[in-house]
Amino acid sequence: MSRSEGPHRGFLPIGNPFKMMMPKTSHLPSTFLTAFEKNLAKRFQQLKPNHPNDVITFSWMKSALSSICDTLDDIRKLIVDLELPICSWDIKWVDMYLDNSLNLLDFCSAFGTDIVRQRFSYVMLKCALHDLDSDNPQKLMKASSSLHEWRQYHNSYDNSKLQDCCDVISKLEQTLNLPKIKNIPKAKDLVRAMYGLKVQTMFIFTTFVAAFSTFPRVLVELQVPKLYLWQESFTELQVVVNGEIKNVYSSNGVSPLMELRRIEENVKKLYPLLHDGLGDVKDEVFKSYCCELMENNEKFLVGLDEIKSEMDRFFKVVVSGRMALLDNFQLQRPRSGVQQVRM
């Protein structure tokens, strides 16, 4: 499963726009915002792997998605705690929230489509492995041919949907510079919390795209000002995860996703034996290779289904928050001069 050749687009245009930071401010955060940022710091700490082998796994990806859902829930609680009714929002706050949530939904849609394509590929592999349990030479030849076809399909895998995901990440990056707001402490707290959510989302989405890519992706490296209570834990997490992904790329690994690397290792051992014959390899060793590949492929399919299910849950959380905001905004009487929100 060698990487496809030729130039590929990274996440971002030329340059490093991620060096742009949120403007420094003398505004002191409220106790509610302080609690929000401490919770976000804990989530970054919990996502920091204890061992390099834990970067990246399906288990880590599930935890990462769950952590974004928790932050979205904290944003809703913060709005209530700040007693900042929707009718008092500046229209640009509403637009910012709706645009960001729409980007999240676009990512879910593109990534979900890629998961479906990934699943089809590994169902093909499962079918190719069906005849490996047989001692019949003809069936083993068929298995060899099927495995060869699967490798060709996998190596020519279309990453267009992952590129759509990269485009969404770039859109999120463009909103990192916060809009200018009036000197309203509650509003500044809300916008500052939204900044934390965007940083968390961009980082996690970037690792997801890298996990399923068949070629190295440019990794984002966000530089967050120290005034945020979650800055240190986020920076440590980013260094560990990005560092391990780079190690995988430098060692010619096909994917940073551990479950995919295991299948790659199995295929590399098994395919030459099916194609050229066992040679000096004992029959029981060959069968152990077959069993290991089948088991790892089955685990991958199960993990893929779990990620798809978690992504669907994340989609519903985003839609729920989006609809709640629109309902509240339309039910409450808008201030004079505030324009209606477009659906």
Image (cartoon, rainbow, N blue to C red):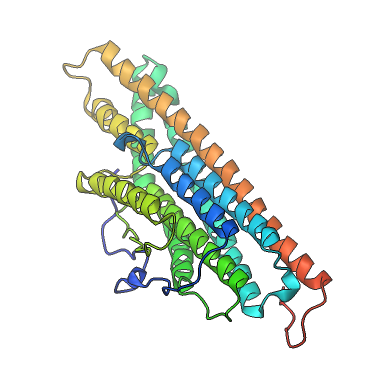
Residue at (52% x, 49% y) in the render: 39
Residue 16, picture quadrant: bottom left
Say whether residue 255 is visible: yes
- Residue 85 locus on image (x, y percent): 73, 68
Residue 285 position (above or below residue 323)? above
Say whether residue 2 is visible: no
Residue 109, picture quadrant: bottom right
Residue 250 position (above or below residue 49)? below
> Is 118 situated left or right of 267 in this image?
right
Residue situated furthest bottom in the rendering = 337
- Residue 163 locus on image (x, y percent): 43, 62
Question: Which corner quadrant holds the C terminus?
Answer: bottom right
Question: Which corner quadrant holds the N terminus?
Answer: top left
> Is 315 situated left or right of 285 in this image?
right
> Is 233 situated left or right of 180 in this image?
left
Residue 195 position (above or below residue 128)? below
Asked whether 164 or 57 is in front, the reply is 57
Residue at (53% x, 81% y) in the render: 180
